[in-house]
Image (cartoon, rainbow, N blue to C red):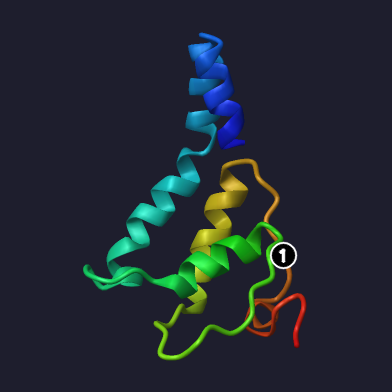
Amino acid sequence: MIPRVFQLLRQGKYDDAAEIYWQLHPARKIKAGLAPALNGGAFINRQAWKFQGWLQGYNGGPLRMPTQRIHDAQMNALRKGLVDAGLEPSMDPFREFFIGRNPA
């Protein structure tokens, strides 16, 4: 969807690009609201990045330790943000994220 925004901007279709931008705002708002809890104010939470990818169909699965935690409430919020943005995130149980779609 983001490459589509840039394509529209290059074509001068600013209103169409803005429509997509604002459609995605609920997901951005949730992610920004969770940033202090996910990142602890200082670090990048790769677990949260990987979870967000998993919601969109990527593999998921374990990360090399040490890693930060992601809790059910945070996972629920990130999924809800995508639903509110009109996307179709994975509705699989969260335990599947920790296994991955292609376990070794």
Q: Would residue 49 appear left or right of 38 to someone viewing this image?
A: right
Q: Tell me the quarter of the image containing the C terminus.
A: bottom right
Task: Tell me which amino acid carries mark 1.
Answer: Met
| Percent x, y of residue 28 | 43, 46
Asked if 28 appears above or below 93 in the picture, the reply is above
| Percent x, y of residue 48 | 47, 69
Q: Would residue 91 appear left or right of 24 to someone viewing this image?
A: right
Q: Tell me the quarter of the image containing the N terminus.
A: top right
Q: Quadrant of residue 8?
A: top right
Q: Quadrant of residue 68?
A: bottom left
How many numbered badges does the structure rendering display?
A: 1
The residue positioned farthest toward the bottom in the image shown: 65
Asked whether residue 61 is in view, the answer is yes
Q: Residues within 10 Å of mark 1 (few under 14, many from 20)?
A: few
Q: Which residue is mark 1?
A: 91
Secondary structure category for the residue under label 1: loop
Q: Residue at x 56, y 69 (%)?
A: 51
Q: Quadrant of residue 53?
A: bottom right
Q: Residue at x 22, y 70 (%)?
A: 42
- Between residue 26 and residue 38, name the one nearer to us: 38
Asked if 4 appears above or below 74 in the picture, the reply is above
| Percent x, y of residue 54 | 64, 66
